[in-house]
Image (cartoon, helix red, strand yellow):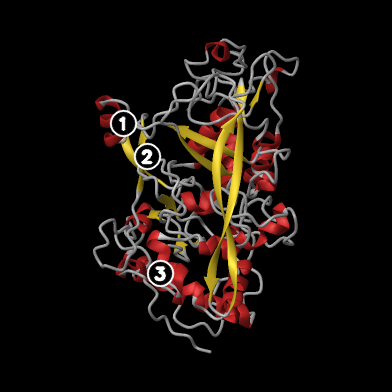
């Protein structure tokens, strides 16, 4: 077939993939990186190294229900030992204080889950509850309010404050509590279905969710409360995403759409109080966290209610409007450290999270997959879902250095339109912006997690539905998919399922 790279919507910066300005590369290496990360132009055969999505770290284990739980294949003996210790802590079930199992003390007082694993089921993707009786343990609601004063607005504008928590309920709705306290409330979801026309076949039905909170445990919420749902993201490949050189992210940004291609990705930034500086952020649905360790520390606090050296408050997300919550016993034990999850715990869990391996690609030479890859490029999907990078030579962790990886993301913020908007700004992200999620491993979601729910709130019940929700900067790519022949759409999905 010999498809050529035609009107992909890729900007000049996307076309010039690989390494301009990278201080970690010699001139010779910059040329090598530029060549190997150049966009595909022909689609008759797979590209070199395409099977190994994560370079030498790729897992080649059988892609079964544990496909997201293997360690980076290039870990040394010590690294694999630390991975196994981190895995134990990731699965560890924490208990309320005081407890006879003192090393497990510190849960809550308010929480969403009793372990990391209960949100990130099998290290994979969470899902919305299937009904009123189903647990929402892998999904929760973020909460905030708009700025209420000039001081609030100044802090938000400076970047020193990412969002203003709801005064009583904090930054996240916790639907569980330790004995003696009420939970904060229960998330409620209602869906309304509507049709989207597809060329050559029956319309697709999308479901639009509406969120509310019932059974409030601490009185009414602020009348301007902003709510945004989140399902737990897959954990694979995080260390390699962390190892992408900042220049390779920043050179793709085009906030003013200077080339008029309709794509205006923006970099996200995080205020680091340790250095009193703004640093590039790349993790989370809104790209609000800069590193795996900081992301892990905030998850310990918000999801489980555990303090760490980076987020030291032992009461987790309990606010001053919940004084009884702040008075509950905590799990800090001075002989173990100054937090409930002291440095060995946070360090090991962060190491585990960095080294959950990306599975190898499957069926890369299947003609349908190759045709689907061509359609992915031609529709303009690669304008945001950047296929490949070579990680930094001086990345912090040896196993992540100088690897050719295929995550299919630019790690930038994009306006995705009104349909996906949550109306809740966070840090650098507006209420309509989302980070481009990595696509590696997406085809194994059903194998690992037993469902095919996608997007930040799981509203999409299939990969096609996820595409059809794209708007804003992705509207043209989405419309191109609706105008494909049914066979071309099937090939596109086959390609995504091979990732």
Q: Check the image and report above or below for 20 versus 230.
A: below
Could you say whether the residue bearing mark 3 is in a helix, strand or loop?
helix
Residue 73 picture quarter: bottom right
Q: Which mark is residue 427?
A: 2
- The disc, 3 or 1, on the residue closer to the chain's N-terminal end is 1
Graded by Cα atoms within 10 Å as few (under 14), some (14 to 19) or many (20 or more), the crowding at tag 2 reads many
Image quadrant in which the C terminus is located: bottom right
Graded by Cα atoms within 10 Å as few (under 14), some (14 to 19) or many (20 or more), the crowding at tag 1 reads few
Please say whether residue 464 is visible from this viewpoint. Answer: yes
Circles 2 and 3: CB atoms closer than 8 Å = no
Distance between the Cα atoms at labels 1 and 2? 15 Å
Residue 367 is situated, as x and y percent measured from the top left of the image, at 62, 83
- The disc, 1 or 2, on the residue closer to the chain's N-terminal end is 1
Closer to the eye: label 1 or 2 = 2
Q: Which mark is residue 107?
A: none
Q: Check the image and report above or below for 114 versus 393.
A: above
Residue 93 picture quarter: top right
Closer to the eye: label 2 or 3 = 3
Q: Residue shown at 37%/67% (left/top)?
A: 17
Kindly identify which residue carries mark 1.
276
- Taking 170 as reference, is 234 left or right? right
Please say whether residue 406 is visible from this viewpoint. Answer: no
Residue 197 is situated, as x and y percent measured from the top left of the image, at 53, 71
Kindly identify which residue carries mark 3.
476
Looking at the image, which is closer to me, 313 or 446?
446
Q: Residue shown at 75%/55% (left/top)?
A: 65
Closer to the eye: label 3 or 1 = 3
Looking at the image, which is closer to me, 268 or 146?
146
Distance between the Cα atoms at labels 2 and 3? 27 Å
């Amino acid at each position: 077939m010999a498809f050529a790279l035609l009107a992909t919507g890729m900007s000049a910066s996307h076309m010039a993939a690989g390494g301009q300005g990278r201080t970690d590369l010699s001139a010779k290496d910059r040329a090598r990186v530029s060549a190997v990360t150049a966009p595909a132009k022909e689609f008759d055969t797979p590209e070199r190294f395409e099977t190994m999505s994560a370079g030498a770290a790729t897992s080649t284990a059988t892609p079964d229900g544990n496909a997201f739980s293997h360690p980076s294949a290039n870990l040394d003996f010590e690294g694999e030992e630390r991975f196994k210790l981190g895995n134990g802590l990731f699965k560890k079930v924490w208990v309320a204080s005081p407890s006879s199992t003192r090393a497990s003390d510190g849960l809550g007082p308010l929480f969403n889950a009793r372990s990391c694993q209960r949100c990130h089921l099998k290290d994979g993707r969470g899902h919305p509850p299937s009904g009123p009786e189903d647990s929402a343990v892998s999904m929760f609601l973020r909460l905030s309010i708009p700025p209420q004063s000039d001081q609030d607005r100044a802090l938000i504008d400076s970047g020193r404050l990412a969002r203003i928590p709801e005064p009583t309920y904090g930054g996240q709705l916790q639907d569980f509590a330790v004995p003696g306290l009420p939970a904060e409330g229960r998330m409620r979801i209602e869906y309304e279905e509507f049709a989207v026309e597809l060329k050559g076949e029956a319309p697709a039905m999308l479901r639009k969710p509406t969120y509310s909170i019932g059974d409030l445990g601490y009185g009414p919420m602020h009348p301007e409360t902003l709510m945004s749902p989140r399902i737990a993201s897959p954990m694979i490949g995080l260390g390699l995403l962390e190892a992408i050189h900042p220049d390779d992210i920043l050179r793709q940004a085009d906030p003013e759409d200077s080339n008029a291609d309709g794509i205006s990705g923006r970099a996200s930034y995080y205020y680091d109080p340790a250095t009193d500086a703004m640093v590039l952020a790349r993790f989370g649905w809104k790209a609000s966290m800069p590193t795996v360790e900081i992301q892990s520390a905030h998850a310990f606090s918000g999801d489980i209610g555990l303090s760490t050296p980076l987020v030291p408050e032992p009461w987790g997300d309990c606010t001053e409007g919940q004084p009884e919550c702040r008075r509950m016993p905590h799990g800090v034990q001075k002989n173990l450290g100054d937090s409930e999850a002291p440095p060995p715990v946070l360090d090991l869990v962060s190491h585990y999270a960095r080294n959950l391996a990306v599975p190898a690609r499957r069926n890369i030479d299947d003609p349908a997959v190759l045709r689907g890859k061509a359609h992915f490029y031609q529709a303009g999907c690669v304008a945001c879902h950047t296929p490949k990078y070579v990680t930094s030579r001086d990345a912090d962790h040896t196993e992540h250095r100088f690897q050719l990886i295929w995550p299919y993301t630019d790690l930038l913020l994009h306006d995705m339109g009104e349909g996906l908007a949550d109306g809740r700004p966070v840090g650098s992200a507006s209420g309509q912006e989302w980070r481009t999620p990595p696509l590696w491993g997406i085809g194994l979601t059903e194998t690992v997690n037993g469902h095919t729910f996608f997007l930040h709130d799981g509203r999409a019940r299939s990969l096609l539905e996820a595409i059809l929700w794209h708007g804003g900067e992705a509207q043209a790519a989405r419309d191109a998919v609706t105008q494909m022949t049914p066979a071309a759409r099937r090939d596109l999905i086959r390609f995504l399922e091979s990732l």
